[in-house]
Amino acid sequence: MVDIKKSTKDGIEVFEAEINGEKIIWDSGLTYNSHLQIEKLLSSQKLISDKPNEMMFVIVHQSMELWLKLCLHELNIIIELIKNDEIKKPLKTFDRISAIQRHMTQSWEILATLTPTDFLTFRDYLKKASGFQSYQYRELEFKLGNKNKDLIIVHRENKGVYDHLVQTLNSPSLYDEILMYLSRKNFKIPEELINRDWSEPYQPHSEIESVWQEIYQESERYWDIYMLAERLTALEYYFQEWRFKHMKTVSRVIGNKQGTGGSAGVNYLTKALDLSFFPELWEMRTTMKNS
Ligand code: HEM
């Protein structure tokens, strides 16, 4: 039996033991488990079938939701900094988001081990539950500028979530904030783009394409904004990779079957690959000339 030395410090019981020559200490205050809410986390996998593959399905979804939570948290930090005209500090936060995105994209590989046979053992148990109902994903899309407002109806019954999505819908997206920043820095940003109904999808504008061209062509002069633009490009690039792998994994698991949420399935997910959060940043790559 290992000897445990007990003492008290500031009203907290402190324990000390030696195991294999290593000192181990812990106390009755904050623990790994209480800080990280491990019991709550590990009791959140409420399986609805007795099929062995459902556990992986649930855990992959839950992990993605946790990463979405972190992406939203980091994105809020970026938006606040940009509102305050700080564009160097967000670069590090953008890099963190990109690292999370790559990790999320990689995690489709785990889901891809689900064969059509495996999935069919529990698919009917899911009833109409679908990724359509991921409110964090919808919030992220809104924050990035895909203001597809009708999709929030699926959250009508959940007032807190619904109101939050409406508020996000009616707020400027990351790109809107960046255009406002550029306007404050005297770039020629059309008034109708920075004084508009934020709940409407952003419409690409040739003047914005010209602004990005100027920034890219005079990259030395506008270095910080140029770096910011490259981070935006990376964010969209990795977002599309995630969408593509989702679509491909779904195709591998259910073929062209309808989704549990009622959509055409793979066909719906493929259409999303044509969406663009920062359209002029992609357009200007075609029209850009050697400076
Ligand atoms: C076998 C696994 C999966 C299948 C077969 C699947 C299938 C689908 C389908 C068919 C749709 C279209 C909506 C519908 O009709 O239901 C969809 C949407 C969605 N799925 Fe998945 N999915 C899977 C895994 C995941 C995972 C792991 C996530 C991670 C969060 C996820 C997140 C989403 C989201 C956010 C949407 C809405 C996309 C949008 O509106 O653009 N899905 N999924």
Image: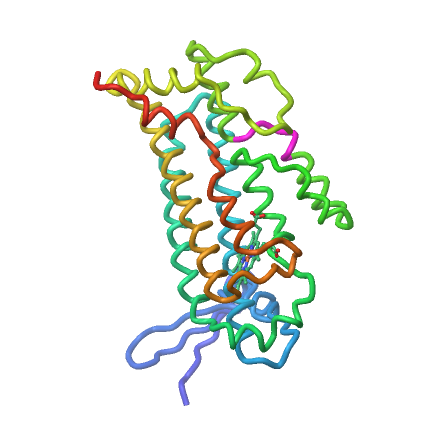
Residue 30 lies in the magenta stretch: no
* Number of callouts: 0
Measured as percent of width and height from the top left, residue 107 is found at: 42, 60
Up the image or down, 153 lies above or below 119; here it is above
Colouring of the image: rainbow
* Residue found at the very far bottom of the displayed protein: 1
Residue span colored magenta: 168-173
For the point 49% across and 38% down, which residue is it? 275
For the point 48% across and 75% down, which residue is it? 6
For the point 64% across and 34% down, which residue is it? 169
* Residue found at the very far left of the displayed protein: 290
User: Would you say 73 lies left or right of 159 here?
Assistant: left
Up the image or down, 68 lies above or below 163; here it is below
Residue 223 vs residue 249, the one in the foreground = 249
User: Which part of the image, by quadrant, shows the N terminus?
Assistant: bottom left
User: Would you say 212 lies left or right of 81 here?
Assistant: left
Measured as percent of width and height from the top left, residue 258 is found at: 61, 60
User: Would you say 271 lies left or right of 282 here?
Assistant: right
Assign ligand 1 to one image quadrant. Answer: bottom right
